[in-house]
Image (cartoon, rainbow, N blue to C red):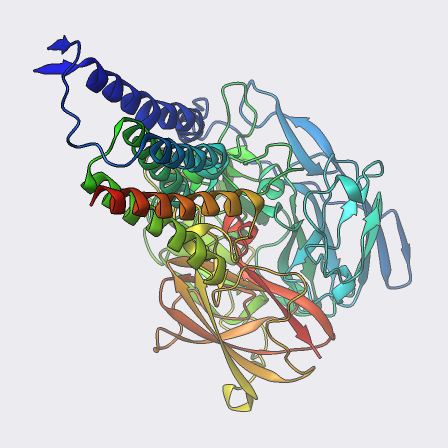
Amino acid sequence: MKFTRREFSKLGLMAGVGFGIPLGTVAGPVDRLAESASVTSPRVEKFEVPLPVPPVLEPVRTEGTTDYYEITQREGAVEILPGYETTVWGYNGIFPGPTIETRTGREVVIEQRNELPVPVSTHLHGGVTPPESDGFPTDLILPPDLSMDDLPGHVSGTVAGISRGSKEYRYPNEQRAATLWYHDHRMDFTGPQVYKGLAGFYIIRDDIEDELPLPHGEKDVPLMIADRIFTDDGEMYYPSVDPSLMGDHGVLASASLGVHTGVFGDTILVNGAPWPRMEVSNTKYRFRILNASNARTYELALEPSPSEGNSFVQVGSDGGLLSEPIPHDKLLVSPAERFDVVVDFSHYSVGSEVTLVNRRGEGRVSDVMQFEVVREEEERSEITSQLAPDLDFPSPDDAEVTRRFIFLAGMLGGMSTINGNGYDPERIDADPRLGSTEIWEFDADPAHPIHMHLVHFKVISRDGGPPGPYDAGWKDTVYLDGGNVRVVATFTPYRGKYVFHCHNLEHEDMMMMANFEVV
Amino acid sequence: MSVVIERHDESAWTGDATSRYFAAALAFTSQAIHLWILPDTFVVTLLPGLFFFLVAIGQGLLGVSLLFGPGRWTLRLGISFNLLVVALWTITRFVSLPALTGSAQLNVGMLGIVSTVAEIALVMSLLKLLGSEQ
């Protein structure tokens, strides 16, 4: 093969300018994506760490029917992986945050102070909350020394305005006993801020629940399940575009590869401990299971299965007790959903090791935690055939309006939308009348846990058929693995602007959120 | 492989040198702009990132080819390629494709305008070169 000098120069320039410079330019980003996708947590021996239970926070004062609390959101150093120190952003510097326990009808007032380097907004998930205390995404609490000019982007559409340093949230708790949780809800940055630790339980109790002989006290155990990735030095790794969380929002495209997008960890934490172990007696235990993962859905099961009966008996859902218990051999729990279940360890002999597994996971994430039956004990609890009085769901026949919302995930880092729209804090996407009943139909592609603020709803159909096995009771979050569901809700008791969104937090941050205003 | 010092075969060359160099400068301008926005886009949204990468390669190859005297098919390909780039930019300013582009409504920014003007001027230059060649 012969080339003239001219042809040789042309080929050389073509190779250099045409391919070399573009390839050189893209090499850095490709490296960053590859590095992000290859982070693997330090190896941890499973079922060695005892299950921690988050401490219950005491009110700083009580007046009449109101309890006052103070929480400081700050950085903390905790030992999550044995032998490693991990920086968390926690409520009172711990992860999970302290549990708030209250009773129906007792008002809770929490002063949330922000000592983190970023703005925050706190949402009580499942709370029937006035709009100014609901943690609207742009109702930010700024750190004391941060100016509005330092904030990335434009802050608009606030409900209760911007606070500096601290904010008082008022929760009337005029609702049934239920397992709620509070977590960060900052516009565009909910994913990384919850991931860093801003989540805690909020449990409402009432007389109806107290009168039931369900397991209680030390046998009533909250389980916050969350997956995380850790770097070699034990710090949590989140693939933010801007890790300071003060610049561009969003995650690296490496979190958008595959069918299920979002940030998935390789280490399963329960109450902040990796694959913990819990010693139990051969009696019934009540577990309030919360999936606080950003994107991972779990299919929970017990291995081995009990010698008789079902693995789980569901007694409650997002919105509190069911009217009747429902037996399950597995539980499908999507992000933000709560399942209140009883496990009867009397079907295992003393010395048995019972593993809570995740059948949707492979390798490290196929296990969640382990129970060891270590002693015999007299059974003092019971699951009655009737739990709560018959639940008073709204009738679909009373619905004034049927609205349809299509949740479409972005491709390879594309924006996730509802009805083709990205989130705009100022746009109102639905305006239900106060006290009215509506049917909302959700379509999902591919998989989305859909959460409505303010209201609880009843799932009335799934893919045109009856509700699924995990749709029972009052819900505030419903999982769609494709297909559609129809729910019925009554919009009460507050007027105002609220959000509904996908609770895959990366989808939420990438705009899969919308506003409704109760008018 | 060997290098021949000179071979006087310029039958494939088209157009005058000034026009070709001007067109090449326009192609390199478009390439430079796409390379500038490539890294930030690529790490967040892969589809637009890959598109910018391919545009940068295409404009680079076209620019070099113009420096050395392209054949008719190169000119035709260059025209089609740049029309496609201009069309995609224009469409995505009016039609929202957030699931693909990562943004509900893409802004009309200065870089986009400069790049599009360069690409339109490039198409016109290539048409002129093609016309003069015929």
Quick one: A161 or A325, which is closer to the camera? A161
Which quadrant holds residue A197? top right
Residue A91: x and y, percent?
72, 40
- For residue A508, side relative to residue A364 (left or right): right
In the depicted structure, whether residue A385 falls above or below residue A337: below
The residue at the far right in this view is A63
Whether residue A371 appears in this view of the structure is: no
Identify the residue shown where x is 53% and y is 30%: A237
Whether residue A500 appears in this view of the structure is: yes
In the depicted structure, whether residue A190 falls above or below residue B7: below
In the depicted structure, whether residue A402 falls above or below residue A15: below
Quick one: A150 or A491, which is closer to the camera? A150
Quick one: A261 or A306, which is closer to the camera? A261
- For residue B115, side relative to residue A489 (left or right): left
Which quadrant holds residue A16? top left
The residue at the far bottom in this view is A397
Residue B31: x and y, percent?
41, 34
Q: In the picture, which quadrant includes the N terminus of chain B?
A: top left
Q: In the picture, which quadrant includes the C terminus of chain B?
A: top left
Residue A323: x and y, percent?
53, 73
Identify the residue shown where x is 40% and y is 29%: A26
In the depicted structure, whether residue A401 falls above or below residue A487: below
Quick one: A245 or B89, which is closer to the camera? B89
